[in-house]
Image (spheres, grey):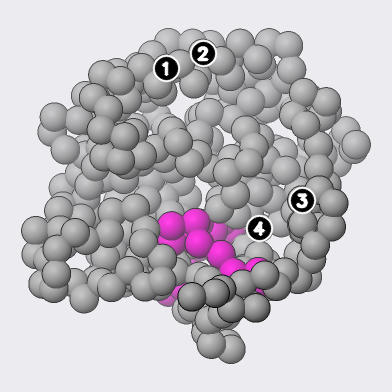
Amino acid sequence: MSLPDKFFTYPHRSYGMDHDRYDWSILPQRKQVTWPGGARVALWINVALEWFPLNFNGDPIHPPGEFAFPYPDLRGYTLRDFGNRVGVYRVMKALDRYRIPATAAVNAAVAARYPALMEKCLARNWELIGHGLDMNHPHYEGMPAGTEETLIAKSVQTLQKATGRKVRGWLSPAKSESWKTLDLIAAAGIEYVCDWGNDDMPYAMRTEAGPLVSMPHPLLLDDWAILIEGRHSEDEFCDQICAQFDVLYRESQQHGGRVMALSLRPWVIGQPFRIGALEKALSYIASHKDVWAATGSEIMDAFNVNAQTHPT
């Protein structure tokens, strides 16, 4: 069976990146970034608050954490529900100890179904960013006209209604995008996106609705990727967090501020036998001077100030 013609159709094709969303550059040659207070590393903890509906079908994209058994997969459903009912509070306790404000990527379904959880996040001054409707509604090329725009609008409006706060950041479910996603989220008032895994630092992007900042949300320094998909041990997870920090901290001495980002899912890291690995890693990072624990919007704002002060 041959591939359809549309498989080979791109809206932009040229030498290089095949898109014009940002200006290509390599990190060592960019202007140095200065974080508030002269911090060397901005610590950005990302917590995904997800909802997988019981009739989850994973079509057409299979996100991390998809169900493994046919409907009704109550084993899979309740494990993920554990994260929003139990695991997340262990994560909160670990972050509270070091006064670290997290950025939580929240499915709109979580915001609607877990009002008490939203209150706990807001009480800690966590930033809550859009994470789509739920994990069963990815974004992809070829969606029916208007569907993606509706999903984004509903996701943002539901989260803003539940929290009373403007939604400034966005992480698509499973980092899924169509060619129009960036334009649509910018039009919805989003200021930064976490879907692109091609950098260690923020950088400016272009959309039809104006500028957008891409934040360095990790693909690999992720509890699911390391502990579940990679089947590494909890000690190895801790070691990899510390190793990532060591390199960024060392680079910051010569090249300016860096971002240490860590992606967590409470149903993974919030298990009693795993939370100690996170606590140990946070203790190690906290033992260093000049570390600024911040939310995504705080880091983006500081980055934008740098860009205005030191334009390329």
Residue placed furthest toward the right:
312
Amino acid tagged 1:
Cys
Residue 306 placement (x, y as % from top left): 79, 35
Q: Are marks 1 and 2 in contact (CB under 8 Å)?
A: yes
Judged by depth in the image, the label closer to the viewer, 3 or 2, is: 3
Query: Which residue is at a point 34% across and 53% down the rendered structure image?
Result: 64
Label 1 CA crowd tier, 10 Å (few <14, some 14–19, many 20+): some
Q: Which residue is mark 1?
A: 242
Q: Secondary structure at mark 1?
A: helix
Q: Earlier in the sequence, mark 4 or mark 2?
A: 4
Q: Earlier in the sequence, mark 3 or mark 4?
A: 3
Q: Secondary structure at mark 3?
A: loop
Query: Which residue is at a point 49% across and 56% down the rendered structure image?
Result: 175
Query: Which residue is at a point 25% across and 33% down the rendered structure image?
Result: 231
Query: Which residue is at a point 77% across and 57% down the rendered structure image?
Result: 18
Q: Which residue is mark 2?
A: 246
Residue 241 placement (x, y as % from top left): 41, 23
Label 2 CA crowd tier, 10 Å (few <14, some 14–19, many 20+): some
Q: Which residue is mark 3?
A: 17
Against 167, is 17 above or below? Answer: above
For the C terminus, the quadrant is: top right
Judged by depth in the image, the label closer to the viewer, 4 or 2, is: 2
Q: CA distance from mark 1 to mark 4?
A: 30 Å
Amino acid tagged 3:
Met
Q: Is 191 inside the magenta-drawn segment?
A: no
Quadrant position of residue 302: top right
Q: Which residue is mark 4?
A: 191
Image: magenta residue range: 155-180
**227 or 201, which is in the foreground?**
227
